[in-house]
Amino acid sequence: MIHYITQGKGIFKTKGRTYHLKKGDLFFIEPGEEIFYEADRLDPWGYGWIGMTGAHMESYLKRTSFFDHPIAHYDQDFDLSLLFIEMQRAYNSPFAIRDLALNHVLYKLLAFLVVHFPNPDDPKKKSPKDYIETIMEYCLSRIERM
């Protein structure tokens, strides 16, 4: 589950650590993880959250840095807020397309998280050399067809 703080502040406790969070912070709760979170009394937070389940969800999320570090910060609020609004609209879609609309936005969110909060140890992460080799292979295959 991903929470995104849109205003105020609060605390999040997980794995023996306490995080003091504020607007623009995200926090990730692993399935089955014992956690505690609470809004600040003087400046309570507002947040959106998205719960995710599915056969490949863990492998998708492991492409992000959240399993190693459950906290992130994103300053460009507009992009992320739009995804949460889009998710809410998808949830309110007609029943016949609701699952498709929700999955569409969920994959956009996952891609956003992987791009902005990548796992530096992700085996699927390509180096510049990998891209150059792919381009060279493509070019060579086209030359052979001429």
Image: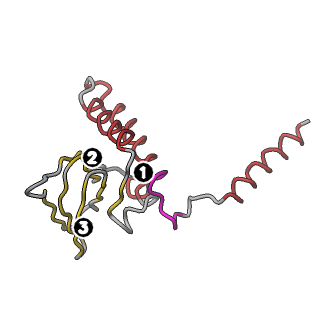
**Residue found 55% across the figure and 64% down from its top:** 123
**Residue receiving disc 2:** 50
Quadrant of residue 139 in the image? Answer: top right
Q: How far apart, in angstroms, are the residues tagged by discs 3 and 1?
A: 20 Å
Which of discs 3 and 1 lies nearer the camera? The answer is: 3
Element type at mark 2: strand
Q: Is residue 38 left or right of residue 69?
A: left
- Give SS at disc 1: helix
Q: Which mark is residue 113?
A: 1
Separation (CA) of disc 1 from disc 2: 13 Å
Q: Quadrant of residue 89?
A: top left
Which residue type does callout 1 highlight?
Leu
Say whether marks 1 and 2 touch (CB < 8 Å): no
Q: Nearer the viewer, residue 81 or 34?
A: 81
Taking depth in this image into account, of 23 and 101 the one nearest to the observer is 23
Give the prevailing secondary structure in the magenta stretch.
Answer: loop
Q: Residue furthest bottom?
A: 16
The secondary structure type at the circle numbered 3 is strand
* Contact? badges 3 and 2 (CB < 8 Å): no
Label located before the other in sequence (1 or 2): 2
Q: Which residues are magenta?
A: 113-122
Q: Which of the two discs, 1 and 2, sits closer to the camera? A: 1
Circles 3 and 1, Cβ within 8 Å, touching? The answer is no
Q: Name the image colouring.
A: secondary structure
Mark 1 neighbour density, 10 Å: few (under 14) some (14–19) many (20 or more): many
Q: Nearer the viewer, residue 27 or 1?
A: 27
- Magenta region includes residue 128: no
Return the residue at label 3.
19
134 relative position to 15: left or right: right
Front tag of 3 and 2: 3
